[in-house]
């Protein structure tokens, strides 16, 4: 290194470089999933003191037209609304606020909609509204002023519930996720799938709020032309630590970790009940996803599972869950992602975990060993040692694959068994391709099996799961003996007859 090395970079002035309007494209391309984006809007409602939040899907016959998030919070003045609609708008967040960066409303909305309209009213001010349209945002950051009569009319639409004196409505138009053609039941299937996923996500990440009697989130579907309400239900809390009985009587146990810069951080370590089928356990994700740290910030779950570079996930730790409330000042140890869907932890945190203790000589490392032992002991208590199998592969729904891999020991270094549809003779319902390790289903019967629904790579999960259970042992032998050949013929005949019956029923319905 030269003796003339400068440890600071010298400058000769400064220059103002405002963001290019196309910055909004980057803002709206941060990978928000639909449910994460909606949850961000609900966060704003909670920050506004809302007690009642309605997520309203509006349809016109078979076509979905709008999504609205309506709350009875304190509302915003016209000046406050301008700040809220400004990218990175500076506002003073309360100590317990869920908002942080001033970008959530805009980035979450414009990542899923062509335009976002916000209408709001406080107890003492008139109703006002603003609208961002993607093409205007890209051009010159021009934000539309909503006609006051329309803004008031929109609030009046929800005058009975939830808005009484004050509140805010966020309206999405041109929602990219909505089906383009709603015929053939596509809209109903989309709503069923999306609302179920959205309800689970909100129930999980906001479970501490939903556990209180004075806070409610409702998901509703209404036909704007007829006024028919198709769906109207409340989101239930989904506590990821809501097990009926601890998997290990020595837990939960609280540990203290003290990384430099933030003081003491408390780890509430739990061991879930083995082999649980509760949504509180299974809705979080796969076996590998659901174990690990559950970080909370101001009572909102901001990360559900993961070990944050402390260790690698493994099946034997699937019962280990650790609740951590982030400190008010995270320093450089913890960093929340912009989407509030993950936490980045510094290497100092991982190092400090090695020394974490409950104050009675029990270490955090001991806890991991106890969670591992609880899982292994539960497997032994099944009464029989299940035989290792070749695992499931492409064509079987990931959730089903995960359950199979959780229930059965999987042979290492073996190519998995795939399931796919293809053309076969009319005298076959399925075929076994040993060389490609694939169960081939006759696509002639696919429409009947799916009941007219649109197919995909992981369609017909029930049928494919049963076919895997029926045939997986065939792939573990080099050839079929006489008894196995007879079984294959038996299954072929019965399934072929059942598939033809499905075709006949479908023809009768037509």
Image (spheres, rainbow, N blue to C red):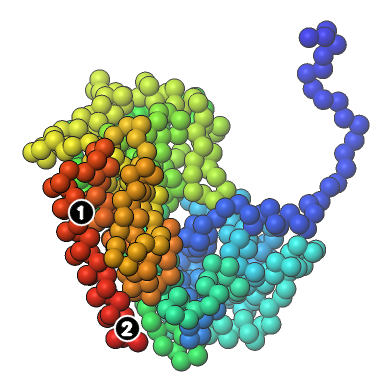
**Please, which residue is most extreme toward the bottom here?**
226
39 is higher (above) or lower (below) than 17: below
Residue in view at x 29 percent, y 29 percent: 368
What's the CA distance linking mark 1 and mark 2?
28 Å
The answer to whether residue 468 is seen in the rendering is yes
* Residue corresponding to mark 2: 507
Contact? badges 1 and 2 (CB < 8 Å): no
Depth order, front residue of 252/374: 374
* Residue corresponding to mark 1: 488
Q: Position of residue 456 (x, y in %)?
A: 44, 62
Q: Quadrant of the C terminus?
A: bottom left
Label 1 crowding class (10 Å Cα cut-off): few <14, some 14-19, many 20+?
some
Question: In the shown orientation, is residue 156 left or right of residue 202?
Answer: right
* Element at label 2: helix
* Element at label 1: helix
Q: Position of residue 477 (x, y in %)?
A: 24, 38
Residue 196's image quarter?
bottom left
Residue 24's image quarter?
bottom right
Q: Position of residue 315 (x, y in %)?
A: 30, 36
69 is higher (above) or lower (below) than 264: below
Question: In the shown orientation, is residue 436 left or right of residue 123?
Answer: left
Depth order, front residue of 510/326: 510
Numbered mark located on residue 351 in the image: none
């Amino acid at each position: 290194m030269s003796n003339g090395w400068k440890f600071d970079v010298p400058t000769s002035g400064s220059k103002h470089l405002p963001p290019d309007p196309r910055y909004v494209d980057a803002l709206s391309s941060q990978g928000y999933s639909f449910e994460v984006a909606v949850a961000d809007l609900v966060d704003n409602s909670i920050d506004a003191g809302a007690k009642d939040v309605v997520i309203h899907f509006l349809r016109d016959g078979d076509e979905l037209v709008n999504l609205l998030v309506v709350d009875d919070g304190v509302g915003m003045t016209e000046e406050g609304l301008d700040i809220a609609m400004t990218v990175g708008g500076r506002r003073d967040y309360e100590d317990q606020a869920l908002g942080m960066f001033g970008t959530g409303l805009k980035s979450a909305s414009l990542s899923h909609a062509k335009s976002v309209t916000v209408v709001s009213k406080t107890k003492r001010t008139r109703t006002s509204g603003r609208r961002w349209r993607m093409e205007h945002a890209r051009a010159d950051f021009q934000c539309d002023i909503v006609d006051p009569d329309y803004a008031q009319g929109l609030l009046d639409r929800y005058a009975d519930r939830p808005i009484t004196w004050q509140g805010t409505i966020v309206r999405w138009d041109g929602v990219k996720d909505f089906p383009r053609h709603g015929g053939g039941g596509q809209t109903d299937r989309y709503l069923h799938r999306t609302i179920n996923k959205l309800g689970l996500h909100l129930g999980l990440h906001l479970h501490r709020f939903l556990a209180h009697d004075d806070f409610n989130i409702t998901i509703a579907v209404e036909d704007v032309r007829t006024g028919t309400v198709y769906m109207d239900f409340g989101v239930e809390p989904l506590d990821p630590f809501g097990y009926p009985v601890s998997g290990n009587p020595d837990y939960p146990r609280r540990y203290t970790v003290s990384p430099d810069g933030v003081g003491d951080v408390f780890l509430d370590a739990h061991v879930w009940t083995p082999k649980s089928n509760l949504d509180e356990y299974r809705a979080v994700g796969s076996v590998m996803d659901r174990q690990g740290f559950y970080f909370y910030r101001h009572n909102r779950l901001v990360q559900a599972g993961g070990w944050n570079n402390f260790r690698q996930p493994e099946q034997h730790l699937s019962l280990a869950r650790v609740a951590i409330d982030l400190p008010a000042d995270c320093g450089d140890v913890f960093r929340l992602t912009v989407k509030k869907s993950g936490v980045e932890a510094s290497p100092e945190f991982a190092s400090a975990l090695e020394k974490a203790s409950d104050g009675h000589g029990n270490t955090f490392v001991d806890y991991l060993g106890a969670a591992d032992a609880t899982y292994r002991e539960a497997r032994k208590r099944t009464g029989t040692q299940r035989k290792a199998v070749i695992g499931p592969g492409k064509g079987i729904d990931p959730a089903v694959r995960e359950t199979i891999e959780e229930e059965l020991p999987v042979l290492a270094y073996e190519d998995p068994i795939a399931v796919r549809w293809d053309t076969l003779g009319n005298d076959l319902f399925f075929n076994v391709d040993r060389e490609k390790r694939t169960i081939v289903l006759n696509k002639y019967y696919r429409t009947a099996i799916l009941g007219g629904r649109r197919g995909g790579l992981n369609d017909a999960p029930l049928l494919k799961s049963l076919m895997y259970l029926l045939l997986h042992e065939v792939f573990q032998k080099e050839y079929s003996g006489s008894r196995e050949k007879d079984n294959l013929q038996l299954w072929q005949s019965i399934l072929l007859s059942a598939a033809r019956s499905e075709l006949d029923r479908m023809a009768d319905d037509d």
